[in-house]
């Protein structure tokens, strides 16, 4: 959870820097991290964490959480892609 908070804070910081035209490279780095990181985490979470402890957690609850966060992930990656493909 702390890693997600740090990643969101870094993204907001990079967006502010992007609009102030002082840190566009950081936005590219964050785009790669956001594009590859969450899908890797979703796979790790399912195959390594959920499958080991599935008796403790309801699968529908787990699936709903991943589905919700996947939509947030798509929105953030989409926003970053739009910003990176348009000139400020």
Image (cartoon, rainbow, N blue to C red):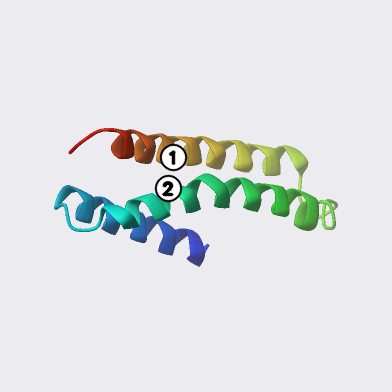
SS at mark 2 in the image: helix
Q: Would residue 42 be found to the left or right of residue 34 on screen?
A: right
Residue count near mark 2 (Cα–Cα under 10 Å), binned few <14, some 14–19, many ≥20:
many
Q: Which residue is mark 2?
A: 31
SS at mark 1 in the image: helix
Residue 86 placed where, x, y %?
A: 26, 33
Classify the position of the C terminus by image quarter. top left
Name the mark on residue 69.
none
Asked where in the image residue 14 lies, by quadrant, the reply is bottom left
Q: Which residue is mark 1?
A: 77
Q: Residue at x 36, y 41 (%)?
A: 80
Name the mark nearer the viewer: 1 or 2. 2
**Residues under numbered marks 1 and 2 in contact, where contact means CB atoms less than 8 Å apart:** yes
User: Whole-Å distance between the Cαs marked 1 and 2?
Assistant: 7 Å
Closest to the observer, 77 or 1: 77
- Furthest-left residue in view? 20
Q: Residue at x 69, y 44 (%)?
A: 62
Residue 27 placed where, x, y %?
A: 33, 51
Q: Would residue 73 be found to the left or right of residue 48 on screen?
A: left
Residue 44 placed where, x, y %?
A: 71, 54
Q: Residue at x 49, y 66 (%)?
A: 2
Q: Residue at x 72, y 37 (%)?
A: 60
Residue 66 placed where, x, y %?
A: 62, 42
């Amino acid at each position: 959870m702390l890693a997600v908070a740090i990643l969101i804070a870094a993204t907001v910081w990079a967006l502010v820097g992007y609009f102030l035209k002082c840190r566009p490279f950081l936005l590219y780095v964050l785009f790669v991290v956001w594009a590859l990181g969450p899908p890797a985490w979703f796979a790790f979470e399912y195959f390594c964490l959920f499958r080991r402890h599935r008796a403790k957690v309801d699968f529908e609850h787990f699936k709903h959480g991943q589905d919700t966060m996947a939509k947030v992930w798509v929105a953030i990656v989409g926003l970053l892609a739009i910003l990176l493909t348009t000139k400020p």
